[in-house]
Amino acid sequence: MIFIYIMKRFSITNRRTNRRTNRRTNRKTNRKINRRTNRRTNRRTNRRTNRKNVKFYMITYKDNMKFAKETQKILKKEWGISSKIISGYKIDKDKYTHTNVLFHGVRDKLLPIMLKGNTDAYYIEDDVRFTSDPLDIPKKDVVWSVYRKGSLDKTKFKKQVITGSQAIFLSCKAQKELKKHMDQSRAIHIDGYFSKYIRETGLSFHQMIPKIGYEQDHKSIISKDKDWLKYKNPN
């Protein structure tokens, strides 16, 4: 009888000990999981929160205004983005050619309005279509989000140029550097210019890989029709 009593007491003690041990283990595990979850959530939240006041500026020209407004509506419907359309110049084959017309439009018309906004901003073209949230990007001065091809990675590519400037994020610092750099630069094709600007200013930079959008097929006086077959589809 004494033996049975001792065994029962031992069993009860074990159960209590196990319950206490399990409670401690569960609390520690839960704390670890919560800390990891909170860190991940905070990183995502901080990344998004810092971008909540980003403005979007779209370059186009008078004859393409209807298409630009269609893009504006799509951005609002799909991503809740409000964008401002800026009408640039039209090719006249004299001062404004297919290689420099966007440079002039950005420098003379879009950039001054962007700078007055006094906040981080996106430069976008009127044919852009996003496939992912354009605000879910790393914290860099310049983020090239939507493009055709290319890279600025000199370890992988002999020619450090990105083709296609459908969407580029610019911090306030990057906008001011862009103003100074454009004022001192020759008007060239906007893709090549943006690539040069990033290389020469040394601003923090990230290229989204894979890109987070594409360019919608439309009648263009800059791009050749055959290019749409390669680049009009997502990634």
Image (cartoon, rainbow, N blue to C red):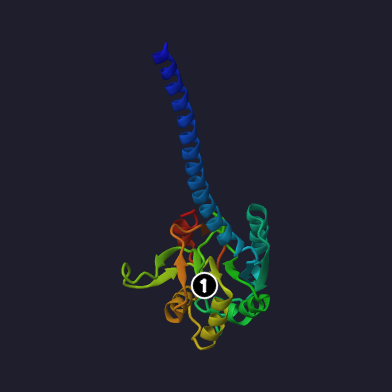
For residue 20, say whether it is visible: yes
Looking at the picture, does residue 12 appear above or below residue 108? above
Can I make out residue 135 in this image? Answer: no
Please name whichever residue, 168 or 53, is drawn nearer the observer in this view of the structure: 53
At x 48%, y 75%, the residue is 194
Count of labels in the image: 1
Which residue reaches farthest top? 1
Is residue 111 toward the left or the right of residue 24 in the image?
right
Q: In the picture, residue 87 is in which quadrant?
A: bottom right
**Residue 116 horizontal side relative to residue 158, left or right:** right
137 or 15: nearer the eye? 15
The quadrant of the image that shows the N terminus is: top left
Q: Secondary structure at mark 1?
A: loop
The residue positioned 44% from the left and 16% from the top of the image is: 5
Residue that protrudes farthest toward the front in the picture:
2
Q: Position of residue 21 (x, y in %)?
A: 46, 35
Q: Nearer the viewer, residue 208 or 36?
A: 36
Residue 159 in the image, given as x and y percentages of width and height: 35, 73
- Camera-side residue of 66 and 14: 14
Residue 93 at x, y = what percent? Answer: 54, 80
Q: Residue furthest bottom?
A: 184
Circle 1 residues within 10 Å: few <14, some 14–19, many ≥20: some
Quadrant of residue 218 within the rendered picture: bottom right
Residue occupying image coordinates x 42% and y 77%: 199
The amino acid beneath tag 1 is: Asp
x%, y% of residue 203?
47, 76
Kindly identify which residue carries mark 1.
141
